Image: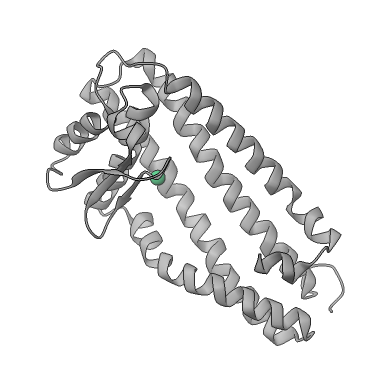
Amino acid sequence: MMLSFLIGWDPMYYAFIIPGALLAMWAQFRVKSAYAQMSRKGTFSGLSGAEAAAQLLRAHGLEHVRIEPAQGILSDHYDPRQKVLRLSRDVYAGRSIASVGIAAHEAGHAIQDRAGYAPLALRNGIVPLASVGGSLAMVFLMLGLFLRSFNLTLVGIGLFSVIVLFQLVNLPVEFNASKRARASLLTSGIIQQVEDRDVAKVLNAAALTYVAATLTAVLQLLYFLYRAGLLGGRRE
Ligand SMILES: [Zn+2]
């Protein structure tokens, strides 16, 4: 909302952002179709998402991590502070490839946490900065562009970079969680080799949405640099 007020109907903004928007739409389509397909497909082991996650956590000595059902669709996440895995109802109780794959991905974050996986620690450190920096960035960018102040715009760009940094650090975290999930599902026997491709279909589609979000943030940053005159264009 704030952003649309900020950039108005500047056609250059849309020129910058189009590749990100297209990839985001493609990713959404891929997620929806993969989830629709794989939430109907059962696994040979017949475990629910919660049962699969519990087994993976046990295998990694993480019995203390609780697994709770969560409200909302695709609200699945691991809370590193409370050591809780929250799974949406369909993932928690579902006995499909999609349910088991997503539950295992979230368990993958708990395993990262236990292993002291550096990008996860870095991401968790950036989260509070990114939420404060994000709101402040919009205020400074708006003031800077409206008042035609190069310095205020520059502060806004600096603050916005924190969001871009968060997205960039988030990528290895997400890819690595899926990698750990697939490996653990196979070694634990919850998923058989022939089913791995289907699990990958769901997790890779989800990963693509993170790639799209990162690309969009980078393109927005480039646009702000362009508006500030730091990228080829004129200085306003
Ligand atoms: Zn994740």
Q: Residue at x 44, y 27 (%)?
A: 200
- Residue 27 sits above or below residue 233 on the image: above
How far across and down, in percent of the image, does residue 4 sit?
A: 72, 64
How far across and down, in percent of the image, does residue 76 sit?
A: 36, 43
**Is residue 146 shown left or right of residue 199?**
right
* Badge count: 0
How far across and down, in percent of the image, does residue 130 sit?
A: 48, 68
Picture quarter containing residue 148? bottom right
Q: Quadrant of the C terminus?
A: bottom right
How far across and down, in percent of the image, does residue 96 sit?
A: 35, 22
**Is residue 95 shown left or right of residue 210?**
left
> Where's ligand 1: which quadrant?
top left
Q: Residue at x 23, y 44 (%)?
A: 68
**Is residue 202 shown left or right of residue 7?**
left
Q: Quadrant of the N terminus?
A: bottom right
Q: Residue at x 45, y 48 (%)?
A: 172
- Residue 137 sits above or below residue 174 on the image: below
Picture quarter containing residue 59? top left
